[in-house]
Image (tube, grey):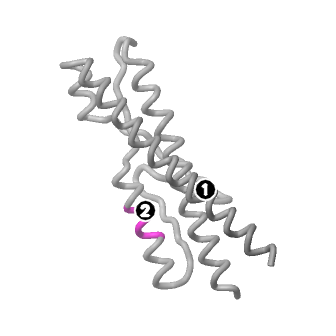
Amino acid sequence: MNISQTVTDNVTELLNKIVDFTDQRRMVLTTNILKCNVTGFIPHDLDTEEFATVMSCAFSEYIKNKRLLFCDAENIKFGRGGSFDSIAVVDEEAKMLFEKDINKYLELQMERLSDNLLNNKIARRLLEQRQVNASSMTLF
């Protein structure tokens, strides 16, 4: 077994999960902005703390047993082939702002969208760098 390749695959898999999660979250946050004028709309978000916990547990399992183990959580469900889905939950903080001050609500959504975009870009950049490094190693 090539330990170096295993580490590469596991790090790549973790980064791919981050990209997938931030892509899913971008869609939720964008919906929160686009539908703010719809009567009865309730803002949602993905549980970022739960996602971080799931990723941390997977990485801890890797450190202990040299394997990644992704376990379902209340709002995160893993499927076949490495797929997973995050279930959007009502965002109580955003809901309160939505009801009281739409401008602050929109500022919050834009701030979250911006943070999410940054996380997505970082994960994608790290994946690109891993691919470049892997390609240069195979040339020798």
Measured as percent of width and height from the top left, residue 132 is found at: 69, 63
Q: Please, which residue is most extreme toward the bottom here?
A: 1
Report the front residue among 15 and 89: 15
Measured as percent of width and height from the top left, residue 102 is found at: 26, 18
Question: At x 56% / y 68%, what residue is drawn?
Answer: 11
Q: How many marks?
A: 2
Label 1 sits on a secondary structure element that is loop
Residue at image mark 2: 54
Measured as percent of width and height from the top left, residue 136 is found at: 74, 70
Horizontal side, residue 81 vs residue 117: left or right: right
Question: At x 42% / y 39%, what residue is drawn?
Answer: 88
The type of residue carrying mark 2 is: Val
Report the front residue among 76 and 115: 115
Location of residue 33 with respect to 14 vertically, above or below? above
In magenta segment, residue 56: yes
Horizontal side, residue 82 vs residue 138: left or right: left
Location of residue 92 with respect to 9 vertically, above or below? above
Check whether the beta carbons of the residues at disc 2 and disc 1 lie within 8 A of each other: no
Residue at image mark 1: 79
In the image, the segment drawn in magenta is 53-58
Label 2 sits on a secondary structure element that is helix
Dot 2 or dot 1: first in sequence order is: 2
Q: Please, which residue is most extreme toward the left here?
A: 100
